[in-house]
Amino acid sequence: MLGSSSLRVVVLALGTFAALSFASVGCRKELPEKYPDERDPPRTPCDQTNVCRIWGWCAEVDGECKPTTNDHCRGSMACQKGGLCSLEPYVSKCIAKDDDCVGSTWCEVYDLCEAREGVCK
């Protein structure tokens, strides 16, 4: 059985835990939605695929769809939503550089407006 001082400590600890739990819920930032994961039929030309539309991977390179120009990146959903508008040729990916994030959906909705380390933060 708990004495009155032990009971006060337990109640105080539970109250502190509850207060911290509610405080952390209010500080949580909403995360951006994920991109659709739609599959294409086999042998679909790269410029007609969902990965072209979504990620900018619109040219065939060594049997794989990859971005090869800034236009591939700029025409993608990843550019409009997440600011991934610039080709990084060394890794064959679209990344965020300079002012790519400004004007993107993620900047407007989630305040991710600065390009750092290839993404909008």
Image (cartoon, rainbow, N blue to C red):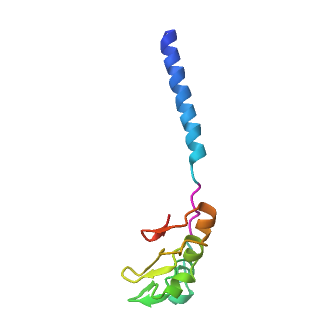
Count of numbered circles in the view:
0
Kindly indicate the quadrant of the structure image that contains residue 107: bottom right
| Residue 44 in view (yes/no) | no
Residue 105 falls in image quadrant: bottom right
x, y percent for residue 32: 58, 62
The quadrant holding residue 24 is top right
The answer to whether residue 32 is magenta is yes
Magenta stretch contains residue 100: no
Secondary structure mostly seen in magenta is loop
Residue at figure coordinates x 58%, y 43% from the top left? 25
Picture coordinates of residue 73, whole percent (x, y)? 52, 82
Residue 93 screen position, x and y as percent: 44, 79
Depicted 63 relative to depicted 9: above or below: below
Residue drawn 56% across the image and 27% down it = 15
**Magenta span:** 30-35
| Camera sees residue 19 | yes
